Amino acid sequence: MNQNNGLMGRRNFLNLTGTGGIALMAAVTGSAFWGVQANRAIAATVDPLSPDAALKRLMEGNQRFVQHKAKHPDQSEARIKEIAQAQHPFATLLTCADSRVSAEILFDEGLGDLFDIRVAGNIVTPEVLGSLEYAVAILSTPVIMVLGHERCGAVTAAVQGERLPGSMNSFVKAIKPAIAKTKDES
């Protein structure tokens, strides 16, 4: 295990799995490369929305949700087969990892329409930043929306100064500078 982040490194993985691990790593690496290439090729053939058009589409979908007039688009078997080949979302959303906040429902969108990045407290770790960069550079999404919500457990714990067990405290630690800045501006 890598002592820095609790993840198993490549060397330990290969020692554990032997040559089967080498074949698996080659297959995963190759498929990841070709997956990026396929997404770039498909993104080039899809007419991207402008940032304004993408935001307008999100807001119109949210209005349908609020008015209980959802259309539930892009949920057909054909759509599932289409997005199994590659993805071409029109927007990227950074949302909280919370069962009450589902972007596809809140914006009345379907499978493959949104590139969701979910993490408690909407904090931006290197992995989250890399995911945002992927959405823009590879998937060509024209808009990134950060979507907060009420009664966020991670934010509440940070505001109340709670210490959470295990790795959960990393969210509290990441949110505290924003709380301090808000208090300084008051």
Image: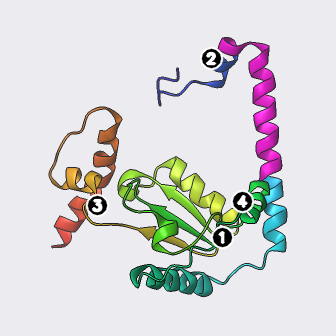
Nearest-to-viewer mark from 3 and 1? 1
The crowd level at tag 1 (other Cα within 10 Å; few <14, some 14-19, many 20+) is some
Residue where numbered disc 1 is placed:
74
Magenta residue span: 15-35
Residue where numbered disc 3 is placed:
178
Q: Which mark is residue 164?
A: none
Q: Which mark is residue 12?
A: 2
Q: Amino acid at mark 4?
A: Ile
Q: Which mark is residue 80?
A: 4
Pointers 4 and 1 in contact (CB under 8 A)?
no
* Marks 4/3: CA–CA distance: 40 Å
Q: Give the image quarter of residue 23.
A: top right
Which of pointers 2 and 4 lies earlier in the amino acid sequence? Answer: 2
Which of pointers 4 and 1 lies earlier in the amino acid sequence? Answer: 1
Pointers 3 and 2 in contact (CB under 8 A)?
no
166 relative to 49 in the view: left or right: left
The residue positioned 65% from the left and 58% from the top of the image is: 134
Q: Is most of the magenta stretch helix, strand or loop? A: helix
Secondary structure of the residue carrying tag 1 is loop
The residue positioned 70% from the left and 15% from the top of the image is: 17
* Marks 2/4: CA–CA distance: 36 Å
Q: Amino acid at mark 1?
A: Asp
Query: x%, y% of residue 145?
Result: 49, 71
Secondary structure of the residue carrying tag 2 is helix
* Marks 3/2: CA–CA distance: 38 Å
Front residue of 58/165: it is 58
